[in-house]
């Protein structure tokens, strides 16, 4: 029976390998050797470890598993073609050893490999997130942080691939602080609860999914821009007909829409479309729905809206064209 390595041992192993990886990277970047020489050096390195792996497999699960996992990490970092082989060998070793920890590590490394190869997406993001949560649950937060940083570094270096194409909706109660002050906490809680029920109902009716509540509004996403627009059109009269009145006035909402690649983070989402929808909403007033050019680019008919011109919105890298949704219920 062989003990499975602790997460502290894995961190130590990675620390031992790190200087070698750094040396090879610096050699490649500085051009100290011709590419062919560097390839020969890399081939020799991985070849020697492969021989050690096959010698060790006859004696122990843990030793060759550690070699395979470390070499998989190194090969991914260096862009070496042997990465997939080492990942497969490590998978076999982790399966034989029955190690949940190593299996979680491998899921993160496979996701990292997919991102490096330009093939990563939502599935790999889900896979790595679940694996990192497993590491945390196993009492290995240091190891989880290390691999989270390695995965994030890859995403930052190669750029995140496409997630799922969605149309994002942000909603917001206009002048909510003043309305709450006029109603009082208890009465406002009742009003807010009814508002929340209406928004959830409308989003669900048009096949949307609530991503998160924002206090006095919601963020949701839809698979099609038409569904998102239909939900926005339905939301304004639904709020109006509910007659959510307080001493300071009636509850009204504003809506912002944007389309693009979105990553599901489990109870939340990430992507430029999320930020864009929130910023576009900020250009609207009570009873209005504004949308970005991205919604039209993803299939919504431009005749149903009116251009408000180019806007420079906080945090967005480039000015975007904003449109007002033209409909009897959103003007």
Image: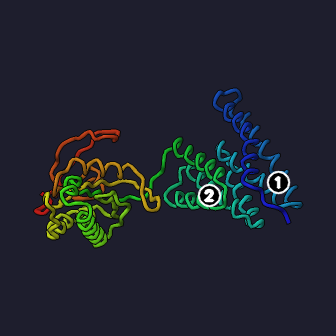
The label shown at residue 307 is none
Residue at 46% x, 62% y is: 266
**Front-most of 331 and 88?**
331
- The reply, left or right, for residue 47 in relation to residue 189 is right
User: Which of the 4 image quarters holds residue 227?
Assistant: bottom left
Please state the horizontal and vertical placement of residue 254, each as a whole percent of the image. Answer: 21, 56
For the residues marked 1 and 2, what is the alpha-carbon distance in whole angstroms? 29 Å
Q: Nearer the observer, disc 1 or disc 2?
A: 2
The label shown at residue 136 is 2
Residue at 67% x, 31% y is: 26
Residue at 53% x, 54% y is: 120
218 over 26 or under it: above or below? below
Please state the horizontal and vertical placement of residue 319, each as a whole percent of the image. Answer: 28, 39
Please state the horizontal and vertical placement of residue 48, each as a whole percent of the image. Answer: 82, 46
User: Which of the 4 image quarters holds residue 89?
Assistant: bottom right
* Circle 1 Cα neighbour tier, 10 Å, few/some/many (<14 / 14–19 / ≥20): some
Residue at 26% x, 61% y is: 185
Which of the image's four quarters has the N terminus? Answer: bottom right
Q: Secondary structure at mark 2?
A: helix
284 over 42 or under it: above or below? below
**Front-most of 41 and 23?**
23
**Front-most of 79 and 101?**
101
Which of the image's four quarters has the C terminus? Answer: bottom left
Residue identified by numbered label 1 = 53
53 over 33 or under it: above or below? below
Query: Is residue 303 at all visible to an observer of this figure?
Result: no
* Circle 2 Cα neighbour tier, 10 Å, few/some/many (<14 / 14–19 / ≥20): some
Q: Secondary structure at mark 1?
A: helix
**Front-most of 145 and 48?**
145
Of the image marks 1 and 2, the number of the one nearer the N terminus: 1
Query: Is residue 28 at all visible to an observer of this figure?
Result: yes
């Amino acid at each position: 029976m062989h003990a499975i390595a602790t997460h502290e041992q894995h961190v130590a192993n990675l620390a031992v390998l790190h200087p070698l990886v750094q040396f090879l990277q610096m050699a490649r970047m500085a051009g100290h050797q011709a590419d062919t020489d560097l390839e020969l050096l890399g081939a020799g390195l991985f070849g020697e470890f492969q021989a050690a792996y096959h010698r060790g497999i006859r004696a122990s699960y843990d030793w060759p598993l550690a070699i395979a996992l470390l070499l998989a990490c190194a090969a991914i970092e260096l862009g070496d073609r042997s990465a997939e082989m080492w990942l497969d060998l490590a998978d076999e070793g982790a399966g034989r050893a029955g190690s949940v920890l190593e299996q979680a590590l491998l899921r993160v490394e496979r996701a990292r490999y997919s991102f490096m190869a330009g093939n990563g997406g939502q599935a790999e993001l889900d896979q790595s997130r679940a694996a990192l949560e497993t590491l945390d649950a196993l009492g290995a937060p240091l190891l989880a942080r290390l691999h989270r940083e390695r995965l994030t570094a890859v995403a930052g270096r190669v750029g995140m691939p496409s997630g799922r194409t969605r149309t994002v909706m942000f909603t917001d109660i206009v002048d909510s602080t003043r309305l709450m002050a006029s109603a009082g906490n208890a009465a406002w809680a009742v009003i807010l609860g009814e508002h929340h029920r209406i928004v959830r109902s409308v989003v669900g009716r048009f096949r949307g999914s609530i991503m998160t509540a924002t206090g006095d509004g919601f963020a949701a996403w839809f698979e099609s821009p038409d569904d998102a627009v239909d939900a926005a059109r339905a939301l304004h009269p639904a709020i109006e007909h509910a007659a959510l009145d307080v001493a300071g006035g009636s509850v009204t909402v504003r809506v912002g829409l944007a389309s693009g690649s979105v990553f599901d983070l489990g109870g939340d989402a990430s992507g430029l479309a999320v930020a864009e929808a929130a910023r576009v909403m900020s250009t609207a007033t009570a009873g209005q729905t504004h949308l970005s050019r991205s919604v039209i680019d993803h299939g919504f008919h431009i005749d149903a809206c009116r251009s408000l011109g180019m806007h420079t919105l906080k945090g967005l890298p480039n000015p975007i064209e904003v449109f007002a949704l033209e409909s009897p219920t959103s003007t």
